[in-house]
Image (cartoon, grey):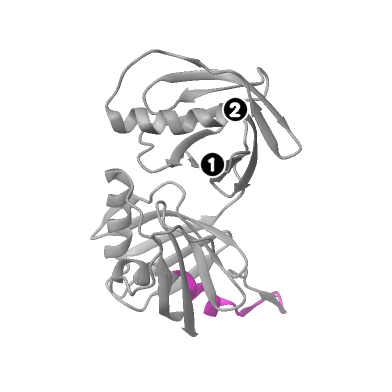
Amino acid sequence: MDRQKHTSRRTLAAVAVLVVPFAAACGSEKAGAGSGAAEAERPVTGVRWTVDSVTLDGATHPAPDGAHLTLGEDGRATGSYGCNLFEARVRTDGDRVLLTDPETTLRACDDRIMEGESAVSRALAAGELKTDVDGDRLTLTTASGDTVRLSEAQDSPLHGTRWNVTTPDGAGRAHLTFDRESGAVSGNLGCNQVRAKATVRDGHITLGVPSLTRMMCEDSLMDTEKALTKLFDGAARYAIDGDTLTLTSENGGEVRAVAAR
């Protein structure tokens, strides 16, 4: 896992609790009988799961955009919490799981995302969680009945998706949408609206000279906008992993965005 410079290896209750239930799925693979023939229950390892929602004390909260998890065959859980990347080692006991040696990045995101992280943390703070797989959905349940619901993730399409920018830090309301028919990209760079030609070819996006509105905003938003305008200077390599879009410019700058739900 690529760790940003602030990555820290420490036991964080919120992250530890989060990843424990995810890994629980590793122990939920079993055979079921049907019509006289055994059918294997859908495996959860090797699948990218999107965290959809958390239910606490009867109230349901949406998870942060981009929150996801992949359970590896090697007993490692990796993914994104919506803001921070995480990784952990897991042990399973039937349909129960235990997390050890958690690692997470320590970035700060906007309040909405951090509140979502808090909700997930609270829901999973009870310790052991039970897993239940139903088709392409995974439910994690605490001893008190709180739940975390996940679904199998598919890569979001580049075109037609509103991509909410999460990196660089403080991107706030920045977002981009690529339109296949017009061959253009439009959105907001943090302060000003933007539109430009967008040529997509061979894993790269070449953006034309941007047309921007001329508003002035607070310094932090203008700093974000300045960083994002560097994308409009040559070709950028792009990659989509589930709900996450990564754009890497020729000068080494990187922008990440998540698909809006």
Q: Quadrant of residue 41?
A: bottom right
Task: Please state which amino acid type lies under the numbered disc 2.
Answer: Asp
Q: Residue furthest right?
A: 202
Along the line of sight, the residue nearer the viewer: 106 or 77: 106
**On the rendered image, what quadrant is the N terminus found in?**
bottom right
Along the line of sight, the residue nearer the viewer: 151 or 208: 208
Q: CA distance from mark 2 to mark 1?
A: 11 Å
**What residue is drawn where x is 62% and y is 67%?**
46
Residue marked by disc 2: 233
Q: Is residue 31 above or below residue 120?
A: below
Q: Is residue 256 above or below residue 188?
A: below
- Total numbered badges shown on the rendered structure: 2
Task: Please state which amino acid type lies under the numbered disc 1.
Answer: Gly
Mark 1 residue element: loop
Q: Is residue 203 above or below residue 189?
A: below
Measured from the top left, where is residue 45 in percent x and y? 60, 70
Q: Is residue 78 left or right of residue 42?
A: left
Any mark on residue 253, and which? 1
Q: Are marks 2 and 1 in contact (CB under 8 Å)?
A: no
Mark 2 residue element: loop
Measured from the top left, where is residue 83 in percent x and y? 40, 52
Magenta residue span: 22-36
Q: Is residue 213 left or right of residue 242?
A: left
Measured from the top left, where is residue 24 in percent x and y? 47, 75
